[in-house]
Image: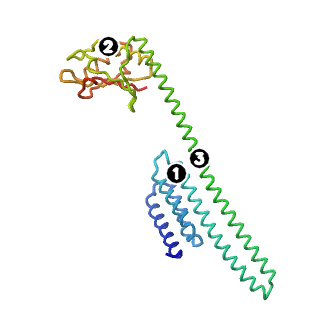
Amino acid sequence: MSMRRIVPLALGLVLAALTAVTAFAAENPVVVQLNQRLARLQSDPALAEFAAYEKLQAQHAVIAFDKARRSQRETLQYVAERRVEIAEIAARTQAARREADRLDRTRSELLVEASRREAERARREAERLRVQAQIQAEETERLRLAAEAEALARQEAETTLDTVAGQQASRLSTARQRELKLAREEAELVSGAKLPASKFESRGEVFTLGADAFASGSAKLSGGGNASASALAAYLQANPKARARIEGYGDKQTPGQRRADALRDALAAGGVQRNRLQSAAKGAGTKARALEVVITH
């Protein structure tokens, strides 16, 4: 397929995309403004046939910005604005180059004509026009490269900031884990009992008590259950801002709510304020899981 057929096809695709996305993004004024700039560029008779690839890149960037999540919108808006600017600059650059080519041809014609008439004057005029067009093209190209460099520098800065933020979050998490480890050790020393096994989940730090924490067929805490309750109460007192949600799992003889209430009452008796405690039933339990204590710090 020849270039004379490829270029109009690409430009037609750009115009179609502009029409569709402008209608879709009517509620986003920034997207509308960017699409209007691309539409004006496409409708300009002097620039419409130039920079088809840059226009497509700009339109893709506008679409990505319009569909972006809130956390990405600032970055993608910046990229979309730079892409539109690059498309405008590229179109003017290519138009200037074509004009320079036309002026070169004009120069040749003037030289032929000048051989019969005022050769020197015609040559100087053609040269002046050529240099002027070249300067304009070089300045436009410089602006395009500067815009690309600015976009890349911003992306690198954002990447660096994301890396630093991730490192800081990791350090904070490590410090928090160390702090909780010391709080667990303190609670075990104060209570003279071991804390139940725990793990960290998205809902918080989860301690699990098995069925042996209760007397057989009863919601009354066993000796081991009371020891675990004492250790948990000391742990909550070592973390005064923490709250506990006690989730009870029942069996045929003992409802889960009664088990959760029994541990809640034991924690309150151990000195934990009741407004920091919440109990609830969570269905059927097993030998390994009769209670879960979810502590949010």
Image coordinates of residue 57 in percent, x first then y, are 52, 60
Amino acid identity at mark 1: Leu
Kindly state the secondary structure of the residue where label 3 is placed.
helix
Q: Earlier in the sequence, mark 1 or mark 2?
A: 1
Q: Which quadrant of the figure has residue 229?
A: top left
The image shows a total of numbered marks equal to 3
Outermost residue toward the left?
Answer: 252
State the colouring used for the structure image.
rainbow
Q: Is residue 222 left or right of residue 1?
A: left
Q: Give the labeled residue for mark 1.
A: 76
Q: Classify mark 2: residues with Cα within 10 Å, few (<14), some (14-19) or many (20+).
A: some
Image coordinates of residue 86 in percent, x first then y, are 59, 60
Numbered badge on residue 226: 2
Q: Which quadrant of the figure has residue 240?
A: top left
Q: Give the labeled residue for mark 3.
A: 156
Observer-side mark, 1 or 3, equals: 3
Amino acid identity at mark 2: Asn
Residue drawn at point x = 75 percent, y = 77 percent: 126
Q: Classify mark 3: residues with Cα within 10 Å, few (<14), some (14-19) or many (20+).
A: few
Image coordinates of residue 281 in percent, x first then y, are 27, 26
